[in-house]
Image (spheres, coloured by chain):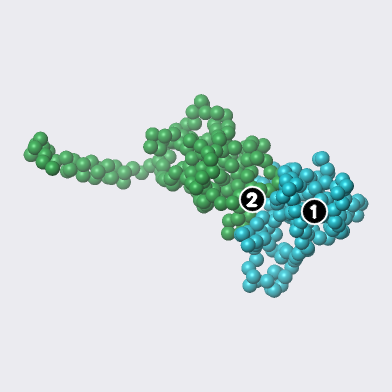
Chain colours: A cyan, B green
């Protein structure tokens, strides 16, 4: 459940997790900031896969595509890069706002890094934010 | 209006009232157990679920897509802030849904089995809710063998509603089918 504004500031509500929010394939996605090493401008010749490609989402048409960025995912053993669409925003999310995937959804979900869900308030209404585990993203073409 | 043909001893209104009285009396005297059912349509077919397993009937709202789900799992909705999955019930039953319209609804259903340590619960997308009614349990007929396998496996019985057949579904069997890869 989304936290009430009035509850912010209490000890339980003050616990947060740092996330990097971005867009890809028309969805609003987030990764733990602790697993992101850097955000770079995208050079056109990069071979890094887009997040949409890894999640098997349809790409936004090139004519409608916002500016893209490159995120560096850091891991003790390896580094990888993924392309995402702007806006890319670093923010703190109250942990109590995070919800696990519903059980029947989780039971048949393809292993693609989707770990949790939450709602974020936007002027047009609540929007689903899909929280991914950057270390569990599928390999390119996998 | 004149009623020249009416015999003095005839009392059509009295007969109607008497029939109603005796009919109502019969209803009161019937002590057969009943079950509350939620009747709904998918395409042209009528189906039902036990009311005890349907916690809420919601109007169709925005369903948010989540990547990596099977086709039958359409996405998630917000139920007062809580995230709830939505399954296209027709996809589990092998029935084509009608076009999305204003009458579309989501039944919040909970079975008696568990998955991942939690009760199996999900929103079920249907095309239209027809009625919520009490049905005498004895009026439930066995599932005909002529039904397609996908329907027969998920059915508990059949009953008549205004000369139309309604299939009473077994929610636990539906969820088990889903977990086994249906849809």
Left or right: residue B75 versus residue A40 is left
Quarter placement of the N terminus of chain B: top left
Q: Position of residue A34 (x, y in %)?
A: 83, 60
Do discs 1 and 2 belong to a common subunit?
no
Quarter placement of the C terminus of chain B: top right
Q: Position of residue A100 (x, y in %)?
A: 69, 54
Residue most toward the front? A63
Residue most toward the right? A77
Of A127 and B113, nearer the camera is A127
Left or right: residue A20 versus residue A107 is right
Marks 1 and 2 close (CB-CB < 8 Å): no
Chain at numbered mark 2: B
Distance (Cα) linking label 1 and label 2: 23 Å
Residue neighbourhood size for the residue with mark 1, other residues' Cα within 10 Å, grouped as few (<14), some (14–19), many (≥20): many
- Residue sitting at 88 percent across and 54 percent down? A75
Count of marks, rendered view: 2
- Reply above or below: B165 against A107: above
For residue B167, say whether it is visible: no
Residue neighbourhood size for the residue with mark 2, other residues' Cα within 10 Å, grouped as few (<14), some (14–19), many (≥20): some
- Reply above or below: A97 against B117: below
- Residue sitting at 75 percent across and 43 percent down? A56
Residue A68 is tagged as 1
- Residue sitting at 67 percent across and 41 percent down? B70
Residue bearing the label numbered 2? B64
Residue most toward the top? B146
- Residue sitting at 67 percent across and 55 percent down? A128
For residue A11, say whether it is visible: yes
The image quadrant of residue A87 is bottom right
- Reply above or below: B37 against B149: below
The image quadrant of residue A131 is bottom right
Of A71 and B136, nearer the camera is A71
């Amino acid at each position: 459940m989304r936290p009430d504004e009035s509850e912010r500031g209490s000890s339980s509500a003050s616990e947060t997790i740092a996330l990097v929010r971005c867009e890809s394939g028309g969805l609003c996605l987030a990764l733990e900031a602790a697993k992101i090493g850097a955000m770079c401008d995208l050079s056109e010749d990069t071979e890094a896969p887009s997040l949409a490609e890894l999640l098997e989402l349809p790409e936004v048409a090139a004519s409608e595509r916002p500016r893209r960025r490159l995120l560096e995912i850091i891991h003790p053993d390896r580094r990888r890069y993924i392309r995402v669409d702007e806006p890319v925003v670093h923010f703190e999310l109250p942990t109590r706002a995070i919800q696990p995937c519903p059980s029947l959804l989780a039971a048949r979900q393809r292993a693609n890094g989707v770990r949790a869900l939450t709602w974020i308030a936007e002027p047009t209404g609540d929007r689903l934010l899909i929280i991914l585990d950057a270390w569990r993203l599928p390999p390119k073409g996998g | 209006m004149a009623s020249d043909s009416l015999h003095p001893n005839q009392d059509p209104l009295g007969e109607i009232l008497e029939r109603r009285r005796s009919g109502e009396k019969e209803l009161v005297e019937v002590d057969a157990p009943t079950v509350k059912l939620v009747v709904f349509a998918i395409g042209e077919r009528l189906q039902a679920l036990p009311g005890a397993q349907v916690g809420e009937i919601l109007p169709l709202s925005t369903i948010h897509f989540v990547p990596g789900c099977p086709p039958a799992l359409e996405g998630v909705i917000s139920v007062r802030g809580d995230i709830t999955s939505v399954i296209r019930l027709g996809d589990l039953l092998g029935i084509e849904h009608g076009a999305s319209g204003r009458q579309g609804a989501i039944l919040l259903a909970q079975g008696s089995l568990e998955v991942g340590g939690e009760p199996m619960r999900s929103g079920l997308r249907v095309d239209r809710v027809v009625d919520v009614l009490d049905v005498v349990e004895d009026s439930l007929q066995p599932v005909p063998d002529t039904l397609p396998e996908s329907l027969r496996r998920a059915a508990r019985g059949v009953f008549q509603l205004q000369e139309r057949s309604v299939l009473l579904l077994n929610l636990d069997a539906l969820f088990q089918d889903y977990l086994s890869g249906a849809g």
